[in-house]
Amino acid sequence: MNDLMEKQRVLLIPYDLQFFAKDGEGGEKTEQPTSKKLADARKEGKVAKSKEVVNGVALLGFFLSLRIFLGFAGTRFEEIFAWIYSIIPDIVKMNGSGLTIQTTEGIFQSLLLRMLIILLPFLIVGFFTGFVANLIQVGWKPTMKPLEPKLSKFNPVNGFKRIFSKDSIMNLVMALAKLFLIIYIAYTTIKDQANNLFILYDIGLKAALSMIFQIIVDTGIKISIVYIILGLADYMYQKWKFTDDMKMTKQEVKDEYKNTEGDPQIKGKQRQRMMESSQRRMMKNVPQADVVITNPTHIAVAILYDNTKDEAPRVVAKGEDYLAKKIKDAAKESGVPVVENKPLARALYATVDIDETIPPELYQAVAEILAVVYTERNQAV
């Protein structure tokens, strides 16, 4: 019997360990990410964004700029060809005599400069559209963290895991969807223009080039729009996945709160020490007070009036219950008069903080008590 129970216990141990491993330390990530965790992730360059949106917007910007700047580019290309043909006779004359390395470099530099002028509008549009697409998705907070080398990226095990991860599957699905849609859009566009393509041999060169260019640009714009739609769907997925990956366990939330706000128990002890220190300072002011006004048992407020410093009487100590008793005991030990006035004691305790002067609406009531106290003090002297 004992042997059977021992075998059952041994068989159950792995399940117990699994249970505690799952629900013990850390637990499941069920809590939404805190603003601090999102801010820390952003500093590391981890944000929810879709490259497909950037590619789609950049592609659309390219085809639109191609339509806008085609005339400019065509004119510049004609100028380049005219320039090349104009310098050919001079190159032939210099061959063998004046064609040096410096001359050749000068020709190529001039050619590159002319080509750069043609490409400059397209480069500006491409940079601007890519920048705006990223800015709309993640906002403006540049960081160099993603560019820092990490040894974990060279780990073959991690690379193998990434191949069969959810992201890889999603990227494969997105790539197949893009390929299918691009082929479909190109096929339908060319099919609609089939009648025009058959007459290319019967029209002039410029008209044929213009027609081909128009077909290419229209196809490109349609593909770009579909690309952006797919990118928006990918962005929604990336945002959901990022939020899901950033979720925290209850213990992580507690630990973060302790690290940022401090341990509640420690903060409670600190507040208690501060309160005790404040009370000790307050109790030192009681012997200097002119009068202590009481409830009579629950509230005590000590009043001091120094006409050389203050425009009105000032509350130097106040408390209720146990602290009120300590204030009254300290006043009696120091010979400070204790006067019972329930309404005035409640009003002073509720409306005036320590080291503040009393409000004007209480001047009359406090003045009457101080007048009696001063009179009795003068008679005693």
Image: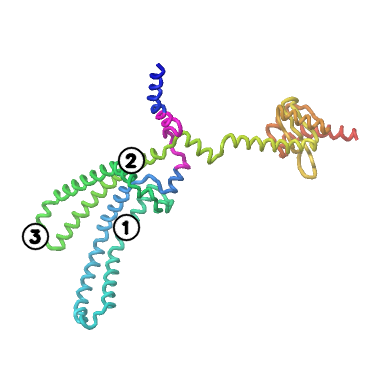
Residue 239 horizontal/vertical position (percent): 36, 41
In the foreground, 265 or 140: 265
Q: Quadrant of the C terminus?
A: top right
Label disc, if present, on residue 168 of the rendered structure:
none
**Residue type pointed to by label 3:** Asp
Looking at the image, residue 76 sits to the left or right of residue 366; the answer is left
Is the residue 36 above or below the residue 100 in the image? above
Q: Earlier in the sequence, mark 2 or mark 3?
A: 3
Provide the residue designation for mark 3: 202
In the foreground, 182 or 208: 182
Q: Are marks 3 and 1 in contact (CB under 8 Å)?
A: no
Provide the residue designation for mark 2: 237
Element under disc 3: helix
Give the CA distance from mark 1 to mark 2. Answer: 28 Å
Instruction: State which mark lies toward you, 1 or 2.
Output: 2
**Residue type pointed to by label 2:** Tyr
Q: Earlier in the sequence, mark 3 or mark 1?
A: 1
